[in-house]
């Protein structure tokens, strides 16, 4: 059943090595490493030297390396720096023995259609650069507080945006870092899009959601009360047995890595309790392999 590995997201910082050594015994099979908005601790190649020996010693893998910069489309020194960082991330993928890099597209504070020309100008050469190195680029589907008309950080927020993006750059190595939560909080059913878009899924974030429909009915989406909550898998509304079945049915091979630090209940002292229970839930949803009789 290792065609789909189950792991968690780890922030790249000075605590990562100790953190990995402590949580690997819980049974995580893969790790996605996040550098946040930039390389504040170590650049990717240097960080690989620190963590890869630990992963190899324990027979676990790096599923993806990730950069969540907001300035990538900006015509500014910060934008140029973000684009340079993306190249460094792509260059370092082989050091992590992965072919997947993930993050945000960047966004000008305009409508999504008005971002597409700049998106193509920036990402077409980066995608071609990645393709030459055998690397796939997956954009997370998080809206980061934006919508169709305005926003920052990211344009890869829904299927209509994906159509525009992939039509603008028709290359096979550009796709998505998908999670159902970011669709559910927009009141989008994640299952129909999963069945349609799996071929573009390069990495999966294990994050679920709970929708309080009574709050939604009373206060609406722009009211004073929160109606949607990010949840660790096993504590939200998704049936991950169904999600994993659909991923497998459509040929997905890769990792589902839990994106922690969001659950409103399993947080603080209960953070790892939530993550490990989420991991074990996902393992039950994936099932165990048993060979057919000869």
Image (spheres, grey):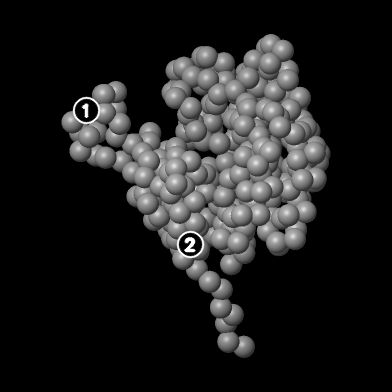
Q: Which residue is mark 1?
A: 219
Residue 223 located left or right of residue 128 = left
Q: CA distance from mark 2 to mark 1?
A: 36 Å
Residue 174 visible to an observer of this rendering: no
Total residue callouts: 2
> 93 above or below 149?
below
**205 vs 59, nearest the viewer:** 59
**30 vs 170, nearest the viewer:** 30
In which quadrant of the rendered image does the C terminus lie? bottom right
- Among the 4 quarters of the image, the one containing residue 36: top right
Q: Residues within 10 Å of mark 2 (few under 14, many from 20)?
A: some
Residue at 67%, 37% in the rendered image:
13
Residue at 63%, 19% in the rendered image:
71
Q: Earlier in the sequence, mark 2 or mark 1?
A: 1
> 215 above or below 147?
below
Residue 99's label in the rendered image is none
Q: Secondary structure at mark 1?
A: helix
Q: Residues within 10 Å of mark 1 (few under 14, many from 20)?
A: some
- Among the 4 quarters of the image, the one containing residue 176: top right
Q: Which residue is mark 2?
A: 280
**121 vs 263, nearest the viewer:** 263
């Amino acid at each position: 059943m290792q065609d789909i590995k189950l792991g968690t997201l780890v922030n790249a910082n000075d605590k990562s090595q100790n953190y990995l050594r402590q949580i690997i015994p819980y049974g995580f099979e893969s790790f996605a490493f996040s550098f946040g908005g930039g390389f504040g601790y170590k650049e990717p190649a240097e960080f690989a030297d620190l963590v890869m020996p630990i992963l190899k010693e324990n027979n676990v893998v790096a599923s993806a390396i990730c950069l969540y910069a907001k300035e990538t489309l900006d015509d500014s020194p910060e934008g140029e720096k973000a684009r340079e960082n993306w190249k460094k991330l792509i260059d370092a993928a082989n050091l992590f023995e992965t072919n997947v890099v993930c993050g945000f597209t960047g966004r000008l504070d305009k409508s999504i259609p008005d971002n597409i020309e700049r998106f193509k100008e920036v990402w077409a050469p980066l995608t071609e650069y990645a393709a030459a190195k055998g690397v796939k680029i997956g954009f997370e589907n998080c809206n980061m507080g934006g919508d169709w008309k305005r926003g920052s950080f990211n344009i890869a927020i829904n299927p209509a945006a994906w159509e525009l993006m992939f039509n603008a750059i028709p290359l096979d190595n550009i796709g998505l870092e998908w999670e159902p939560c970011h669709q559910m909080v927009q009141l989008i059913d994640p299952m129909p899009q999963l069945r349609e878009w799996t071929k573009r899924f390069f990495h999966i974030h294990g994050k679920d959601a709970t929708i309080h429909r009574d709050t939604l009915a009373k206060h609406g989406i722009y009211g004073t009360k929160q109606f949607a909550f990010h949840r660790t898998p096993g504590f939200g509304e998704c049936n991950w047995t169904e999600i994993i079945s659909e991923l497998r049915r459509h040929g997905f091979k890769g990792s589902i890595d839990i994106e922690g630090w969001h659950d409103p209940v399993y947080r603080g002292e209960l953070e790892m309790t939530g993550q490990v229970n989420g991991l074990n839930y996902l393992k039950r949803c994936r099932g165990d392999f048993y060979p057919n009789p000869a």
